[in-house]
Amino acid sequence: NAGVMQNPRHLVRRRGQEARLRCSPMKGHSHVYWYRQLPEEGLKFMVYLQKENIIDESGMPKERFSAEFPKEGPSILRIQQVVRGDSAAYFCASSPAAYNEQFFGPGTRLTVL
Amino acid sequence: AQSVTQLDSQVPVFEEAPVELRCNYSSSVSVYLFWYVQYPNQGLQLLLKYLSGSTLVKGINGFEAEFNKSQTSFHLRKPSVHISDTAEYFCAVSGLNQAGTALIFGKGTTLSVSS
């Protein structure tokens, strides 16, 4: 059973460009979480999705950030018009149910030039 | 505000020495507790978790943690560390946010094991 997959592992964007981060959960997992890790900080929750639904986006910045988890395909975290402050490691986690162990992917390291 | 506090940002120890990494949380509701380890440029791996039952939880790689409800603590311990234990360790809780399931992380403790 393959683990949580994220791609790309490294992403470089110039200010103003768009960044798309992909997450394929473990087989059988329908719950996906996105977290952001800024330098010298722990991980911060961003958004929690189930198939086709956003359950909790209380940690998402109000502008430029969006997330989806379509019926088919990976979950996507989209950052529009990136700024240098968006440079961070973005981790995806999946679980088979709510209030269950979350399995983390290797992360996408976004660098904004 | 609800939060998770890891009291030590860095813990240097010698190989084969015991170690304790401290974690406290604030919450007025029941929570689930976790410790994760992160090796450089990798994702997080679950070390152990407390959901209910015995307050002493044993995890992988010889680690264990004890849940203390009265002190709202969940300290991680290992009786004898190895060089390979050098990594970043994160304490996390769920049950604190509006949906209840997202993990709230502490800022992490860097464990450095030297010979």
Image (cartoon, grey):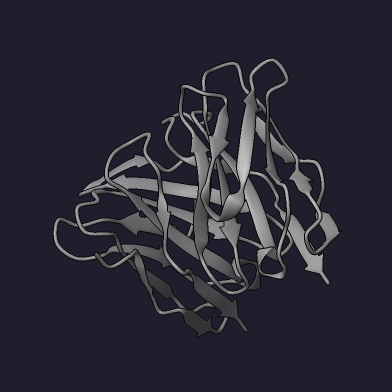
Q: Within the image, what quadrant is residue A73 found in?
A: bottom left
Please tell me which residue lies in front, A45 or A14: A45
Q: Is residue A27 left or right of residue B77?
A: left
Residue A95, image x and y in percent?
A: 32, 47
The residue drawn where x is 45% and y is 79% is: A9
Please tell me which residue lies in front, B114 or A26: B114
Residue A101, image x and y in percent?
A: 40, 43
Q: Is residue A61 among what the camera can see? A: no
Residue A37, image x and y in percent?
A: 60, 60
Above or below: residue B53 compared with residue B88: above
Above or below: residue A42 compared with residue A78: above
Q: Is residue A7 left or right of residue A11?
A: left
Q: Is residue B39 left or right of residue A22?
A: right
Q: How many marks?
A: 0
Please tell me which residue lies in front, B11 or B60: B60
The residue drawn where x is 42% and y is 43% is: A57
Q: Within the image, what quadrant is residue B115 found in?
A: bottom right
Q: Is residue B42 among what the camera can see? A: yes
The residue drawn where x is 38% and y is 34% is: A99
Residue B92, image x and y in percent?
A: 58, 41
Q: Quadrant of the N terminus of chain B?
A: top right
